[in-house]
Image (cartoon, grey):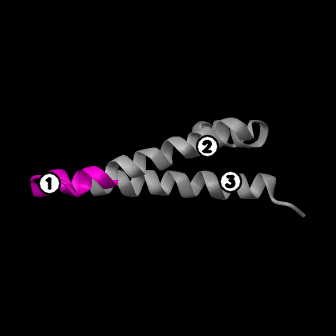
Amino acid sequence: MPRITDLERCIKSNPEQTQAKLDELIQALIELKKVITIPEKPEIQKEYCQLAEAVLSAKKIIETLEYRYHKKS
């Protein structure tokens, strides 16, 4: 769990870096969605879809942690 702990520390102490990481993930999703539309072998298409799902999951995790640590009371 050290990686989650490092991510949590970053989210708590550096909102700008957190937003930069979210922006990178959004850009990666945009690029993957473009690539997914290009006809490829089925196994390659499946890999691109799995990558997109992983990026989307990472984005959701970061957003959830960010909300948890910075929610307004």
Q: In the rendered structure, which amino acid carries the disc numbered 2? A: Ile
Q: Position of residue 64 (x, y in %)?
A: 65, 58
Q: Residue at x 63, y 55 (%)?
A: 63
Q: In the rendered structure, which amino acid carries the disc numbered 1? A: Glu
Give the mark nearest the N terminus, 3 or 1: 1
The answer to whether mark 3 and mark 1 are in CB contact below 8 A is no
For label 2, count other residues whose C-alpha is less than 10 Å away and answer few (under 14), some (14-19) or many (20+): few
Would residue 42 be counted in the magenta stretch?
yes
Taking the view exactly as shown, the residue that stands out farthest to the left is 41
Secondary structure predominantly adopted by residues drawn in magenta: helix
Q: Which residue is mark 2?
A: 4
Q: Secondary structure at mark 3?
A: helix
Q: CA distance from mark 3 to mark 1?
A: 33 Å
Residue range corresponding to the magenta coloring: 33-47
Q: Which residue is mark 1?
A: 43
For label 1, count other residues whose C-alpha is less than 10 Å away and answer few (under 14), some (14-19) or many (20+): few
Relative to 42, does residue 22 appear above or below in the rendering? above
Q: CA distance from mark 2 to mark 3?
A: 10 Å
User: Viewer-nearest of labels 2 and 1?
Assistant: 1
Q: Which residue is mark 3?
A: 65
3 vs 41, left or right, is right
Q: CA distance from mark 2 to mark 1?
A: 31 Å
For label 3, count other residues whose C-alpha is less than 10 Å away and answer few (under 14), some (14-19) or many (20+): some
- Work out which quarter of the rendered image holds the C terminus and state it: bottom right
